[in-house]
Image: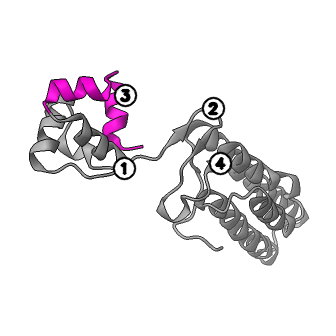
């Protein structure tokens, strides 16, 4: 959906009404909404008519389909819509396997492919689990080498598992609220 169409619909205007107010032909408005970038005078007049900044008409926004809770992904992933219900399932599947670290990676990975959600959110969920799976034994071994005793080792193990549970649950809450991850990496490991 073009930015012009979104703004026009937000202002409850038809293409004909916008054409009358702006003195821009309906055909020009249709071309802009179909993807043609508005130029100079046309962009300025439309921006003034709609009471928005000129550059607001240049940006493309992702298409949101409220009834299925799906959003079009970035340019490289436009063929695969993001289904946030599936993303949440992929994220929470790691929760079932926090005590079996290899499975907290493989189960979400399998779900990512079976649910056809090969997008950045699913990849980030799996990448975060991969980092946690690598870091957990390192932290555990450091705790053993410090030789604080058996009680410290047990507490450390519990804290390591609880940290992963917290990461998974916090990401699930952020997916619900803002359709993004709270804990994410600046890179993808897959």
Mark 4 vs 3, N-terminal side: 3
Tell me the SS state at disc 2. Answer: loop
Q: CA distance from mark 3 to mark 2?
A: 18 Å
Q: Is residue 87 magenta?
A: no
- Name the one closer to the observer, 53 or 142: 53
Q: Is residue 2 magenta?
A: yes
- Name the one closer to the observer, 59 or 8: 8
The picture places residue 140, in percent across and down from the top left corner, at 79, 70
The picture places residue 97, in percent across and down from the top left corner, at 87, 58
**Quadrant of the rendered image containing residue 185:** bottom right
Q: CA distance from mark 2 to mark 1?
A: 21 Å
**Quadrant of the rendered image containing residue 65:** top right
Q: How many marks?
A: 4
Residue behind mark 4: 171
Q: Are marks 2 and 1 in contact (CB under 8 Å)?
A: no
Residue behind mark 1: 60
Q: Which mark is residue 67?
A: 2
Q: Main secondary structure of the magenta part?
A: helix
Q: Which residues are magenta?
A: 1-23
Tell me the SS state at disc 4. Answer: helix
In the rendered image, is residue 166 in sight? no
Q: CA distance from mark 4 to mark 3?
A: 33 Å
- Name the one closer to the observer, 47 or 29: 29
Disc 1 crowd, CA 10 A, few/some/many (<14, 14-19, 20+): some
In the rendered image, is residue 69 in sight? yes
Residue behind mark 3: 9
Q: Is residue 70 left or right of residue 162?
A: left
Mark 4 vs 1, N-terminal side: 1
Q: Is residue 134 left or right of residue 188?
A: right
User: Considering only vertical position in the picture, is 89 above or below 144?
Assistant: above
User: Considering only vertical position in the picture, is 147 above or below 19?
Assistant: below
- Name the one closer to the observer, 102 or 20: 20
């Amino acid at each position: 959906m073009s930015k012009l169409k979104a703004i026009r619909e937000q202002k409850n205007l038809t293409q004909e009404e916008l054409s009358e107010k702006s003195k821009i032909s309906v055909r020009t408005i249709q071309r802009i909404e179909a993807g043609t970038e508005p130029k100079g005078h046309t962009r300025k007049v439309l921006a003034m008519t709609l009471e928005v900044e000129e550059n607001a008409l240049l940006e493309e926004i992702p298409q949101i389909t409220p009834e299925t809770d799906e959003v079009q992904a970035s340019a490289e992933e436009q063929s695969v819509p993001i289904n946030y219900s599936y993303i949440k399932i992929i994220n929470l599947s790691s929760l079932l396997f926090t005590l079996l670290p290899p499975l907290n990676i493989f189960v979400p990975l399998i779900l990512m492919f079976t649910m056809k959600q090969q997008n950045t959110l699913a990849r980030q969920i799996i990448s975060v689990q991969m980092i946690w799976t690598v870091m957990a034994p390192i932290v555990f071994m450091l705790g053993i080498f410090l030789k604080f005793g058996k009680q410290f080792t047990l507490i450390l193990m519990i804290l390591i598992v609880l940290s992963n549970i917290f990461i998974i649950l916090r990401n699930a809450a952020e997916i619900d609220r803002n359709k993004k991850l709270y804990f994410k990496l600046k890179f993808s490991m897959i």
